[in-house]
Amino acid sequence: MFRVVRLSLCGDGEVLSRCTHPALFESRDEAMAVARQGAEGLLGDFAYDARRQCWSGTDRRNARFRFVVEEVAVEVAVSD
């Protein structure tokens, strides 16, 4: 199982906050598609970060976000 996590970033790229998407996905590809939609939906610039293997983007206020996909164990998924 996989989940999408939205990370809010400060100016130097440090993580300010972390928000887990409520849905779980059976494949990494499904989760990556949702991560892309999240970055695209910010209505600013967005791109795939090949080094981190995630999507990133900015909103209208130029706030920065990263959308990462994490693999989760079934036991963890049920308790979240």
Image: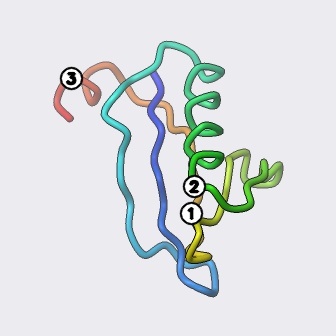
Q: Residue at x 42, y 75 (%)?
A: 16
Q: Disc 2, disc 3: CB below 8 Å?
A: no
Look at discs 2 and 1 and give the one toward the viewer.
Answer: 2
**Alpha-carbon distance for marks 2 and 3?**
29 Å
Secondary structure of residue under mark 1: strand
Q: Earlier in the sequence, mark 1 or mark 3?
A: 1
Which residue lies under the disc numbered 2? Answer: 42
Judge whether 49 appears above or below 9 on screen.
Answer: above
To which quarter of the image does residue 17 belong?
Answer: bottom left
Q: Is residue 48 left or right of residue 6?
A: right
Q: Which residue has dot 3 on it?
A: 78
Q: Residue at x 67, y 56 (%)?
A: 56
Kindly identify the amino acid type of the residue bearing the numbered disc 1.
Phe
Quick one: label 1, few (<14), some, or many (20+) residues within 10 Å?
Answer: many
- Front residue of 51 and 23: 23
- Tell me the SS state at disc 2: loop
Which quadrant of the rendered structure holds the N terminus? top left
Amino acid type for the residue under numbered disc 3: Val
Where does the image place residue 7, in percent across and percent down from the top left?
Answer: 48, 60
